[in-house]
């Protein structure tokens, strides 16, 4: 963790010691629950995980507005997209200065989306794409991000080739940019569609810093087993993407735009969170919504409601974990 993360965690732990409640959207959260197997050092002693806002959740806002809104709503971190960083630079902004502004607001950047086409069908195509990958890594590093999300090409399907490329990409990211590339699995990627495929690529890369990025929505629509995260080591997860899915449309027809606030859908979110508690995962839970209905609403209100509903599910998961022993 960064020094800023440790500082915020220490302050949050201090707040928990005096049982300070946290007001979210006008609702007073219950006191910290001692039943958690992990320290409740975030969100004023209410959460074992820092809560992050993926900027796609309030997409129409400018990047600087998204950062301000995340801080005002009470998030611990923000997760931007590479296109936003590029636009910010092209409009005359300095990403290193922006990273300092983010830290001054009490936020940090756990990851950036992403290294598009970061893994390719062949070694030749991987190397041909490296200039674009390095440019994205430069921007991601400049803002102070810990991770870069690796999105394989849709044509990349050879598991061994992907694992070899991923190993080399981690080396490039860590050695040249101090950024750890982490592999996503997405329902529309044949070579990295399910959590098991992504985990296999990460393991077969042979790199000790290999990581994957679970997303509960993509686990749902790609039929990944919901209890599969219990088989992971906590340091294999770079960040945990969080959302919910409605009953309609059915998962065979569900798309990213159908994501809804945590607790407003049918996914077993407390089960996911209890699995994170079980394995000892302590990094970010990131609210990631692409719902156009939310984009049309007040951005601060959407961010605030999203945090409140995320925290409600966390409270429930911690309480249930303690009750179950």
Image: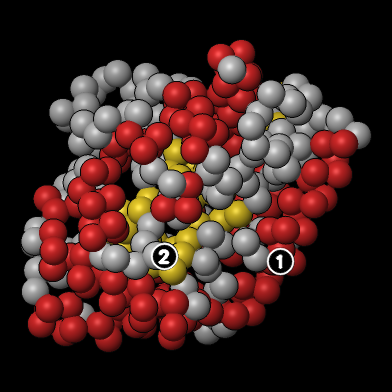
Identify residue for label 2: 209
**Closer to viewer: mark 2 or mark 1:** 2
Identify residue for label 1: 3
Residue 236 shows in this picture: yes
Q: Which residue lies most toward the top here?
A: 323
Residue at 53%, 43% (x, y): give it.
281
Q: For marks 2 and 1, give the CA distance.
A: 20 Å
> Is residue 254 shown left or right of residue 5?
left
In the displayed structure, 174 sits above or below 107; it is below
Q: Position of residue 223 (x, y in %)?
A: 21, 31
Q: Where is residue 43 in the image (x, y as percent from the top left)?
A: 71, 40
In the displayed structure, 50 sits above or below 87; it is above
Residue at 12%, 78% (x, y): give it.
123
Task: Rate crowding at label 2 as few (under 14), some (14 to 19) or many (20 or more) other CA atoms within 10 Å.
Answer: some
Nearer to us in this view, 173 or 264:
173
Q: Quadrant of the C terminus?
A: top right
Which image quadrant is residue 152 in? Answer: bottom left
Which image quadrant is residue 34 in? Answer: top right
Total numbered labels: 2
Q: Which residue lies most toward the right here?
A: 18
In the displayed structure, 86 sits above or below 34; it is below
In the displayed structure, 12 sits above or below 35; it is below
Q: Which of marks 2 and 1 is nearer the N terminus?
A: 1
Q: Where is residue 175 in the image (x, y as percent from the top left)?
A: 44, 83
Which secondary structure, mark 1? helix
């Amino acid at each position: 963790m960064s020094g800023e993360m440790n500082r915020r965690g220490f302050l949050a732990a201090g707040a928990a010691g005096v049982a300070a409640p946290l007001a979210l959207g006008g609702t007073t959260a219950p006191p910290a629950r001692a039943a958690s197997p992990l320290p409740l050092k975030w969100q004023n002693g209410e959460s074992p995980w820092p809560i992050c806002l993926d900027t796609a959740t309030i997409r129409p806002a400018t990047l600087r507005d998204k950062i301000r809104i995340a801080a005002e709503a009470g998030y611990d971190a923000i997760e931007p997209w590479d296109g936003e960083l590029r636009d910010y630079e092209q409009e005359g902004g300095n990403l290193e200065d922006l990273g300092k502004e983010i830290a001054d607001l009490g936020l940090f950047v756990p990851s950036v989306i992403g290294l598009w086409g970061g893994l390719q069908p062949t070694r030749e195509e991987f190397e041909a794409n490296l200039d674009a990958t390095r440019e994205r890594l430069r921007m991601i590093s400049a803002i102070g991000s810990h991770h870069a999300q690796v999105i394989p090409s849709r044509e990349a399907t050879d598991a061994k080739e992907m694992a070899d490329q991923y190993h080399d990409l981690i080396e490039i990211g860590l050695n040249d940019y101090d950024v750890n590339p982490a592999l996503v699995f997405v329902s529309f990627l044949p070579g990295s569609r399910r959590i098991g495929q992504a985990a296999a690529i990460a393991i077969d890369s042979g790199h000790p810093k290999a990581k994957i990025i679970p997303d509960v929505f993509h686990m749902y629509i790609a039929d990944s087993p919901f209890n599969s995260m219990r088989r992971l080591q906590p340091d294999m997860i770079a960040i945990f993407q969080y959302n919910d899915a409605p009953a309609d449309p059915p998962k065979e027809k569900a798309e990213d735009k159908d994501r809804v606030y945590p607790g407003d859908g049918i996914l077993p979110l407390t089960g996911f969170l209890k699995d994170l508690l079980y394995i000892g995962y302590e990094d970010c839970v990131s609210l990631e919504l692409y719902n156009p209905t939310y984009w049309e609403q007040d951005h601060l209100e959407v961010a605030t409601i999203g945090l409140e509903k995320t925290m409600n599910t966390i409270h429930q998961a911690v309480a249930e974990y303690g009750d179950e022993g």
